[in-house]
Image (spheres, rainbow, N blue to C red):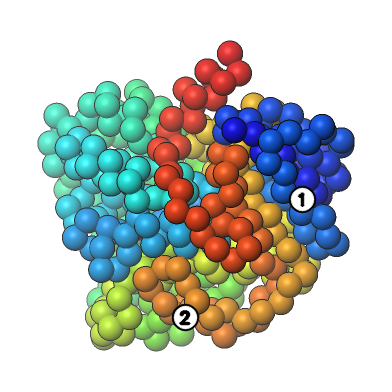
Amino acid sequence: MTLTVKGRLFTPHGLMEGCVRISEGWIEEVGRELRPEGEMLDFGGKNRVILPGLIDMHVHLRDFRLAYKEDFRTGTRAAAKGGYTVVVDMPNTLPKVNTLSVLRRREELAKRRAVVDFGLYFGVPDRKEELRKEVAKKCLGLKVYLPEEGEGEVLWEALRFAAREDLLVVVHAEDPSFFRGGERPPEAEAAGIRRMAGWSLKEGFRLHITHLSSRLGLEELNRWKERIRLSADTCPHYLLLTYRGDPLTRVFPPLRQAWDRKALLAGVREGKVEAITSDHAPHRLEEKMEPDGPGGFPGLETELPLLLTMVKKGRLSLGEVVRACSQAPASLLGLPAGRIERGCVGNLTVVDLGESYRIDPSEFESKAKYSPFQGMRVTGKVLCTIVRGQPVFLEGTVEERRGTNARSYREAGQAAFA
Ligand code: DOR
Ligand code: ZN
């Protein structure tokens, strides 16, 4: 199977008119003029750019007993439409993905239902016997929620396991001992980062702070950067929205203030906040609207248009978006991806930087058809999403392809170019 894609390419050496040839799922050649081989897709046109396939390293695809909120099929259809070629799924499902047997079931289900590629995180188990080699072979990282003081005996074992197996430790860094009633102040985030960074210093695991939300958190992060292997991501809502206190914008960590948004944007631009994720967290609208309803909202279908709109307004560069949504996640997760060059997986995201429209959640592929961004005017549209050389989203239609565990890119990549 060979696919040649032609147009304006975003390569590690800058934008260039040319072709990418993807053979058996891997980028074989990039050049100005390639002999067309196999199927050909031409994305000529003024505002069109071919980006390395986007990777969202923080999504909740639900399924299992929460399939009424989202399942692998609908969640990854949302990913395909949103321009995402790989999505990495969080383990706070029902049941939780924190035993080997649930992890195996999860992978099997994802292989049957996902239309783009997926990665999996493992949750901290209840028993240390679950921390087996096979877990490390199926996962891209360990997801940690900070325990209350004194809680979490197995957490230590899990962190050591992550250090040994070189699994990324992805942390929701709010320290619950700083919550006051319903308030979750930025101090909770800074304290959570401090606690985890101290443990990383001791145990040596790679620490990743996910959905960083505050200036205080970023300042704490910067204090540790030189001493441990530390990275972070933030989400479009922390860059664009300010706390309103209504159910639709309820998310944990909460939305914060204008100065937090400004600091986080500067962090992304300077590469101190390496990645941007959606934290796609679908819930049924009725649950969401209850007074103590859950946090989170769908994000896969709004993330890229929102970021491209920031590019249009000069608040981010296209290179910064590619770095945060493709290169950095690939590198943090250890995947041969995120660059249009020979030897990387054949994942591409084609966008039109000129097309303007309003965000309309009724058109979402996600089961959650609402968004705090609904009605907002954006400029930048996904035209095509290519996963391992196969178009999964093209001309407004999502194709029913079969996704694979992106963990396998590591070995497959070595084999393809041996
Ligand atoms: O807002 C949130 N939603 N924060 C979390 O930590 C979990 C997530 C979810 O799973 O819905
Ligand atoms: Zn989340």
Badge 1 density bin: few <14, some 14–19, many ≥20, Cα 10 Å: few
Q: Position of residue 370 (x, y in %)?
A: 43, 79
> Is 135 situated left or right of 31 in this image?
left
The image quadrant that residue 69 belongs to is bottom left
Q: Is residue 362 above or below residue 124?
A: below
Label 1 vs label 2, nearer the camera = 1
For the residues marked 1 and 2, what is the alpha-carbon distance in whole angstroms?
30 Å
Q: Position of residue 125 (x, y in %)?
A: 19, 41
Is any atom of residue 82 visible in this view?
yes
Q: Position of residue 372 (x, y in %)?
A: 48, 79
Q: What quarter of the picture does the N terminus occupy? A: top right
Q: Residue at x 40, y 27 (%)?
A: 166
Amino acid at circle 2: Ser
Q: Position of residue 36 (x, y in %)?
A: 78, 36
> Is 14 situated left or right of 261 in this image?
right
Q: Which mark is residue 332?
A: none
Residue at label 1?
A: 42
Q: Is residue 168 above or below residue 245?
A: above
Residue at label 2?
A: 362
Q: Residue at x 54, y 81 (%)?
A: 360
Q: How many marks?
A: 2
Callout 1: SS: strand
Q: Is mark 2 within 8 Å of ligand 1?
A: no
Can you name the residue that lies furthest to the top here? 418
Q: Residue at x 83, y 46 (%)?
A: 15
